[in-house]
Amino acid sequence: MKILLAVDGSAYTKKMLAYLVTHKETFGGDNSFTLFTVQPAIPPRARAALGKDVIDQYQLD
């Protein structure tokens, strides 16, 4: 089974991940988990003022 999970770093996300780790047998043996997060776009003026290196580092974090 393929399972897609939205993560945001919140306490709820941490609880959900902890649950999945401790209840693997609930979902069967052959699972594929994909985690994703969405970041809002940085406004163009802020992007220009901060510079590419700062923006790149922010998005890596």
Image (tube, rainbow, N blue to C red):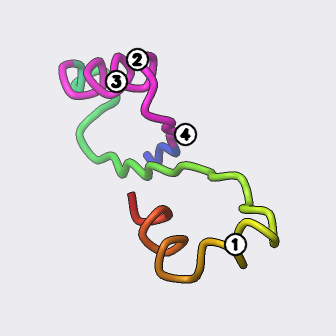
Amino acid type at circle 1 is Arg
Disc 4 is placed on an element classified as: strand
Q: Tell me the distance, in whole angstroms, between the alpha carbons under discs 3 and 4.
A: 11 Å
Q: Which residue is label 4 attached to? A: 6
Residue closest to the far front: 49
Q: Amino acid at mark 3?
A: Lys
Residue marked by disc 3: 14
Q: Is residue 35 above or below residue 45?
A: above
Question: Which one is earlier in the sequence, the residue at label 1 or at label 2?
Answer: 2
Cβ–Cβ under 8 Å for marks 3 and 4: no
Magenta range is: 5-22
Q: Are marks 3 and 2 in contact (CB under 8 Å)?
A: yes
Question: Residue 12: horizontal and vertical position, in percent?
Answer: 45, 17
What residue do we see at 33% from left, 46% from top? Answer: 31
* Residue 12 colored in magenta in the image: yes
Label located before the other in sequence (4 or 2): 4
Main secondary structure of the magenta stretch: helix
Q: Is residue 61 left or right of residue 6?
A: left
Kindly state the secondary structure of the residue where label 3 is placed. Answer: helix
Query: What is the CA distance from the residue labelled 3 to the residue labelled 2?
Result: 5 Å
